[in-house]
Image (cartoon, grey):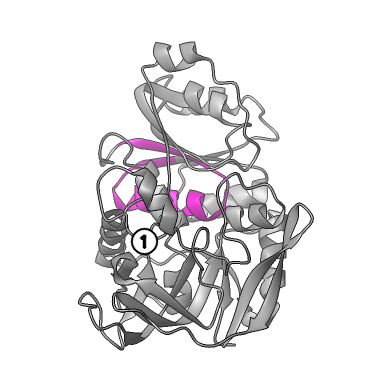
Amino acid sequence: MKAVRLTPEGDRKKPELRDEPVPVPERQEVLIRVHAASLNFRDQAILAGQYPGSVRAEGIPLSDGAGEVVAVGSDVTRVKVGDRVAANCAVHWIGGPHLPEYQSASVGMTIDGMLAEYVTLHENALVHLPAYLSYAEAASLPCAAVSAWSALHVATPLRPGQTVLIQGTGGVALFGLQIARLFGARVLAITSTDEKAEKLVKLGAESVVNYRARPDWDREILDLTGGKGVDKVVDIAGEATIVKSAASAKIGGEIGLVGFASGFGGGLPPIDILSRTLTIAGIGVGPRTNFEALLATMAAGETKPVIDQVFPFTEYREAYRRIDSGNHVGKVVVDITR
């Protein structure tokens, strides 16, 4: 089979395509023929040597993928040959709070990921895919969509009539928009260009603020909410946004901190949290139960993810470059079958 592995190159990593034997599943493992995989911001950060988490030496990258079960171990009971599946990012995080031991089996990070023609995974990770989703569409869900779901359910469930703030046009942001709209919530957004703002409005955002034209975008968000602030914020940038995210939230509001696209600083003063009695949570994607709830909610209305571009397997480096450009709107996918 063909598989991409990350090799050291100074402080960075270089993806290289290799020929390898097809892996054999152990007794609780499943062999999956991968049809599609997708990239997230952190995948490019790993190449650039800017990711703070643990990454397996010379591992297969990408946490996100979807495919068909082609063989199962002797003790597997959750799936069968022929099933269409995707994998939760944290293999053994089924439900409940995140525990340290879950980090030892993180797809595409501490264990081999999905940028290969075949992968083996423990059956605990797998979710069944609804028939209406293509493999490319399903491959876009495990990290970004589940993270957005978790960020919108930090301390309390998302409810109709609430107001949600999303940031940008990447995968997490657009899934946050789609999920919020499925729940009947009002969506406000910030982005970097008027062109992207138009796309967000077409996807269901009520109002969009160009943060380059309006650096004080938090004031605009407050104005759009009559001075009250939003119920929930999905923060993906970190350093450049966290202070204004807090200022944009209502008293008692919730912030799901998903990413670090602008850096690891931010300097959020404790008084900003105390004065607004905010709940702020770091989002480590989410458990399998969140993934399953997300799929059920999407399937009810046959909601499809926004795909920016699909690259053939032979052009996987171009997919990385597309993520690095920051020009994508939605998910960047690699079709492993071509």
Q: Is residue 205 above or below residue 36?
A: above
Residue 51 versus residue 235: which sits nearer the camera?
51
Q: Which quadrant would the N terminus be assigned to in this image?
A: bottom right
Q: Is residue 292 visible?
A: yes
Q: Is residue 220 visible?
A: no
Q: Is residue 295 above or below residue 241?
A: below
- Report the residue that reaches farthest toward the right: 10
Q: Residue at x 59, y 28 (%)?
A: 217
Q: Is residue 264 above or below residue 27?
A: above
Q: Which quadrant would the C terminus be assigned to in this image?
A: bottom right
Q: Residue at x 57, y 56 (%)?
A: 55
Q: Is residue 213 above or below residue 251?
A: below
Residue occupied by mark 1 = 91
Position in image of residue 225 (x %, y %): 42, 27
Q: Residue at x 34, y 80 (%)?
A: 84
Position in image of residue 16 (x %, y %): 70, 74
Position in image of residue 24 (x %, y %): 42, 85
Residue 79 versus residue 209: which sits nearer the camera?
79
Mark 1 lies on a secondary structure that is loop
- Report the residue that reaches farthest toward the left: 77
Residue 22 versus residue 66: which sits nearer the camera?
22
Left or right: residue 223 versus residue 212 is left
For the record, the magenta segment spans 162-187
Whether residue 96 appears in magenta in the rendering, the answer is no
- Give, as a three-letter code, the residue at label 1: Val
Q: Residue at x 30, y 69 (%)?
A: 127
Position in image of residue 279 (x %, y %): 36, 26
Whether residue 184 appears in magenta in the rendering, the answer is yes
Q: Quadrant of residue 152?
A: top left
